[in-house]
Image: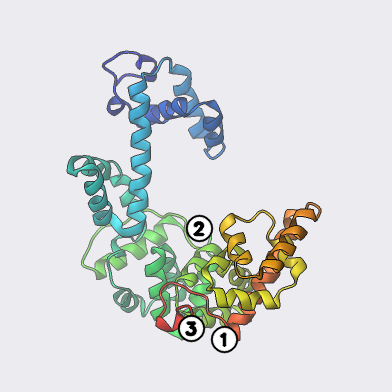
Amino acid sequence: MAALRDLEKPEITASSLKGIQKAAALLVAIGEQRAGEIFKYLGETEVEALSLELAKAQKIPTEVCRDVITEAVESVLAEDYLAEGGVDYARSVLMRSLGEDRAEEIIGRLAATIERRPFEFLRRTPAEQIVVFLRNESPQTIALVVSNLHTMLAAQVLSDIDPEIQADVALRIALMAETRPEVVSHVETVMRSRLSAVGSQEYAAAGGVKSLADILNSSDRTTERNVLDELAKADGELAEEIRLLLFTFEDVVKLDDRSIQMVLKEVDQKDLAIALRGVNDEVAGKIFGNMSERGAELLKEEIQFQPPQRKRVVEEAQGRIVGVVRRLEEAGAIVISRGGGSGDDALV
């Protein structure tokens, strides 16, 4: 197969290049500055391999650059579709937009990636069935499985498991860092056998505080409260870290106008002026839109004339406002909309 130095030959196409050659061609196509940014995220071995190909590369035809960029974009989109709804969903969406042949080509190209996803075979399994399979397993094993499921399914499984071990499982997800490949392979094999399937997959990192927060954000309020209350008994700092991730200052746009107005009555105006520094127009507009015209003008003037603030100061002010939101929610004065709950969790 021709190396990149032969790209000036008209018979060379993007499809004839190896993976490393396509990657090098893509870096050339996007320019030195963007390529340098990408290098920051690569390992030493990858950088060395790409540097060698870049050194070989000479003139790359425009059509090859275009095809390589198109393939990269399609692959990213396809992986997003896979993460959202699995192989069948990705294939269906790609077929509608690109046609059957192109869709099958992309799915085929990503086959290795698909096979590397831990517990991918559970994606279409009902949550209640997964809970049954896990019923006699240890909290650590349950945490491993749940942390590798996609967010909505993980939220449903966490909501359905026994409340007595629910918080223990959540704690293990939050503290999870890496798991030995052989452990994951064994658990997958057991799960597959219970689903009358065969084979095993390799481990991919999952879990952690952010993972648990994402799951709880998609859980019902009862599950969230139970998990956080029990976590607070075991590790107060960890519980608070997760609690803050469940609702960020930018999430104020998810509140209805009445709830925002209640929050504004409770917050310190100085905190509000600092917290609004650097936020996007949607957040600022939501805040100003729920104030009186005079109040909004005064707040804008205060923001305009206040001295520059350190990022830490801004984040602390935002955190205090988030604390007000959480306190009002705990008191039942407002309701934060979240996925996976019942109609009782809808905005009022």
Q: Position of residue 190 (x, y in %)?
A: 31, 67
Asked whether residue 27 is in view, the answer is yes
Quarter where residue 62 is shown: top left
Label 2: which residue? 178
Give the quarter of the image for residue 2.
top left
Residue 230 position, x and y percent, is: 57, 82
Instruction: Using the image, determine if residue 222 lies above or below residue 276.
Output: below
- First in sequence: mark 1 vs mark 3: 3
Q: Position of residue 262 (x, y in %)?
A: 63, 79
Q: Is residue 235 visible?
A: no
Q: Which mark is residue 332?
A: 1
In the image, taking residue 173 as reference, residue 82 lies left or right, namely left
Nearest to the eye among marks 1 and 3: give it: 1
Total of numbered circles in the picture?
3
Q: Which mark is residue 167?
A: none
- Nearer the N terminus, badge 3 or badge 2? 2
Q: Residue at x 66, y 76 (%)?
A: 324
Vertical arrangement, residue 25 with respect to residue 91, above or below: above
Q: Which residue position is annotated with label 3?
A: 222
